[in-house]
Image (cartoon, rainbow, N blue to C red):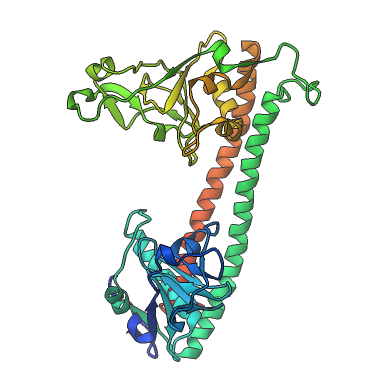
């Protein structure tokens, strides 16, 4: 952590964090001590991911490791974060400090000081989510500290300004969620025929539409990976798509390329522009995602290439249908350890089929609406970035004694 060099008001001091509070590292709990009942054990993931499950224990430990509602906590390994604990009594795991401010340091003032320090550290790591600090380096980091009454007045002003800012952020995130719902609604209406045919009845397909399957009208190819330990198979001019690159997108380039020899020594094929690729493996968000090739490319064995004949089907129409049915297609996967699609399951995916002239119209209607949604999303993201910049600006002024 870098030294702070700012001009402070006369009654302010620049003090090391180690002088303004005590920092107690949590206990190194062993897996053998985890239970399903008792007090929760606070790990870093329980602080930075609300959905993370807790481990528990009914055993008793030194009281210094006990956390109570309102305690100030700081995770200092891998993922930095400062938190006010708002739960019931719990035990503190290692790599998290319980912070006990001294009588001349306001707890919430220190909380905001640490928030500012964390933001500065992350800004220097160029977007990396991993930062680690040692206790000695942490405690030697200096913060500006005014008299206690001034600290409390600054906290009051920060929270007044943050309250307004947080309301705006909440509204922006609500709008973001509404856009996500709107996009799905557009796709649902499209594949019910309602974007192009106002006379369609609920539950009925438009005239000329039928439900078929991917395998009935498309060729499906499973990819392959050339041997990694054969250098002459890699670094050529043939684009090669990995499953991690399938993320509801257009593929215009690939991270890796293979050679002609690499292609010949596998079951790989090179697929034309317009081929739709679907990821078959992945317990996270990967399985079921799709992409359209905008370049000729081969692909790995965890993906299936659906060759689209443009005379009977539009690539974008198939792509948008796979976006709509993403959750359904993920559930089709089978397997105990890691659920997966396979060639036959991909071929069995039901899809609507209707005249090419109407397909063109449906795609145009989808894209005109999604284009508007994309612009709104971009505006929301910019506003969220501006809100975060304003938050840091407020903290900067606060700790320079310039907050009015």
User: Residue 7 occupies which quadrant of the picture?
Assistant: bottom left
Q: Quadrant of residue 225?
A: top left
Q: Quadrant of residue 294?
A: top left
What residue is at 52 percent from the left and 79 percent from the top?
155
Looking at the image, which is closer to me, 280 or 166?
A: 280
Q: Position of residue 115 (x, y in %)?
A: 44, 70
Residue 187 % position (x, y): 64, 30
The answer to whether residue 25 is left or right of residue 316 is left
Q: Is residue 362 above or below residue 186?
A: above
Visible residue check, residue 402: no
Say whether residue 89 is visible.
yes
Whether 80 is drawn above or below 346: the answer is below
Q: Residue at x 42, y 71 (%)?
A: 74
Q: Is residue 224 above or below residue 153?
A: above
Residue 6 picture location, percent across and down: 33, 77
Tally of numbered tags: 0
Left or right of 110 on screen, residue 255: left
Which one is nearer the viewer's eye here, 112 or 318? 318
Judging depth in this view, the residue of 204 and 116 nearest the camera is: 204
Q: Nearer the viewer, residue 57 or 286?
A: 57
Which residue lies most toward the top here? 311
Q: Residue at x 61, y 32 (%)?
A: 328
* Quarter of the rendering occupied by the N terminus: bottom left
Picture coordinates of residue 224, whole percent (x, y): 35, 23
């Amino acid at each position: 952590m870098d030294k702070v060099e700012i001009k402070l008001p006369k009654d302010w001091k620049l003090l090391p964090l180690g002088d303004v509070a005590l920092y107690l590292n949590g206990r190194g709990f062993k897996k053998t001590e985890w239970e399903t009942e008792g007090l929760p054990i606070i790990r870093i993931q329980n602080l930075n991911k609300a959905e993370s499950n807790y481990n528990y224990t009914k055993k008793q430990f030194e009281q210094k490791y006990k956390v109570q509602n309102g305690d100030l906590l700081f995770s200092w390994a891998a993922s930095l974060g400062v938190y006010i604990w708002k739960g019931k009594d719990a035990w503190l795991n290692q790599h998290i400090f319980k912070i006990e401010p001294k009588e001349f340091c306001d707890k919430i003032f220190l909380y905001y000081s640490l928030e500012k320090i964390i933001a500065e550290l992350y800004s220097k790591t160029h977007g990396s989510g991993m930062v680690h600090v040692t206790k000695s380096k942490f405690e030697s980091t200096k913060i500006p500290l005014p008299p206690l009454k001034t600290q409390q007045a600054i906290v009051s002003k920060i929270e007044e300004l943050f309250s307004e800012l947080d309301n705006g952020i909440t509204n922006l995130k609500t709008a973001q969620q509404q856009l996500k719902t709107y996009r799905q609604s557009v796709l649902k209406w499209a594949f019910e025929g309602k974007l192009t045919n106002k006379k369609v009845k609920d539950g009925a397909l438009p005239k000329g539409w039928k439900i078929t399957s991917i395998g009935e009208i498309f060729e499906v190819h499973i990819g392959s990976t050339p041997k990694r330990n054969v250098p002459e198979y890699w670094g050529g001019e043939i684009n090669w798509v990995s499953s991690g690159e399938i993320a509801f997108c257009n593929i215009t380039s690939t991270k890796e390329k293979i050679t002609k020899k690499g292609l010949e020594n596998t079951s790989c094929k090179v697929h034309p522009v317009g081929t739709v690729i679907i990821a078959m493996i992945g317990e996270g968000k990967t399985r079921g995602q799709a992409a359209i090739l905008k370049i000729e490319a081969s692909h790995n064995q965890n993906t299936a290439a659906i060759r689209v004949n443009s005379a009977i089907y539009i690539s974008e129409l198939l792509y948008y249908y796979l976006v709509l049915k993403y959750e359904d297609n993920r559930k089709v996967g089978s397997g105990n350890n890691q659920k997966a699609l396979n060639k036959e399951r991909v071929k069995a995916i039901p899809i609507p089929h209707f005249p090419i002239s109407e397909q063109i119209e449906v795609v145009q209607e989808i894209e005109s609406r999604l284009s508007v949604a994309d612009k709104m999303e971009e505006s929301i993201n910019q506003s969220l970035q501006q809100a975060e910049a304003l938050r840091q600006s407020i903290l900067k002024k606060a700790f320079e004694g310039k907050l009015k």
